[in-house]
Image: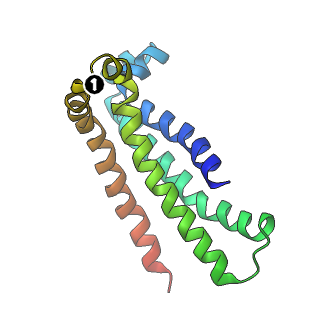
Amino acid sequence: LSVVGVLFWSVPVSFLQAWTNVAQLERWIPQFATLGAKLPLLYTFIVKYLPVLTLMVLLAVLPYIFEFLAKRYEQHKVKSDIQRIVLNRYFGYLMATLYVTVLSSSVWDTLEIIMNSPPEALKLIREHIPEVAVYFITFVLARVGISLPILLFFP
C-alpha cells in the first residue's frame, strides 16, 4: 500500500516541480510570458511561493490521511501504534518528496542524453541540481517561518 501511495504521490510533486520551471509555464500558458513585465509581484508569487505553499499544504494533510488509514482501513486500536505508523509513513513520504523533486528536474529532462552517453550523466545532474536549490531553500524557509510559530502555540 505504501509503495503504491508513493508512486501516486510522485505525480503531484512532479507537477509542482514543473510549475517552478518558467519555461514550461510559458509553454503551457503563453500569456504567462507577459505577466512578468506587467505584474512582477504576482509573477514572483506564482513562480516562487505558490508551488512551495501548495506542497506544504499537501504535506500538512498527509498525517491526517495516514491516521485515517491506520484507524479505519488497517484497524489499529492503540494510539501509540497509530502515531508510530503515521510518523514512519510521513517520513517516507518526505524522503520520496525530496527524491522526486530532485529527479523530476534533473534526470527526467535529460534522460535521453543520459541514455545515449552515460558519462555525461554526472555533468548534467551537476548543472541541473542548482535549479532545484532555490525551490528547496524557499520550502525550508517557508516551513520554518510558518510551521514553527504554529507549533510553539501548542503545549
Q: Is residue 142 left or right of residue 121?
A: right
Q: Nearer the viewer, residue 32 or 81?
A: 81
Q: Is residue 53 above or below residue 111?
A: below
Say how the picture is coloured. Answer: rainbow
The disc labelled 1 sits on which kind of residue?
Answer: Pro
Could you tell me if residue 35 is visible in this image?
no
Residue at 46%, 49% in the rendered image? 97
Q: Is residue 153 left or right of residue 63?
A: left
Q: Is residue 21 above or below residue 8?
A: above
Q: Quadrant of residue 100?
A: top left
Q: Position of residue 102 (x, y in %)?
A: 36, 40
Residue at 54%, 68% in the rendered image? 88
Q: Is residue 51 left or right of residue 145?
A: right
In the picture of the structure, the residue carrying the numbered disc 1 is 118
Q: Nearer the viewer, residue 19 or 104?
A: 104
Q: Position of residue 139 (x, y in %)?
A: 36, 51
Q: Nearer the viewer, residue 99 or 41?
A: 99
Residue at 43%, 30% in the rendered image? 18
Q: Is residue 8 left or right of residue 113?
A: right
Residue at 44%, 14% in the rendered image? 27
Could you tell me if residue 64 is visible in this image?
yes
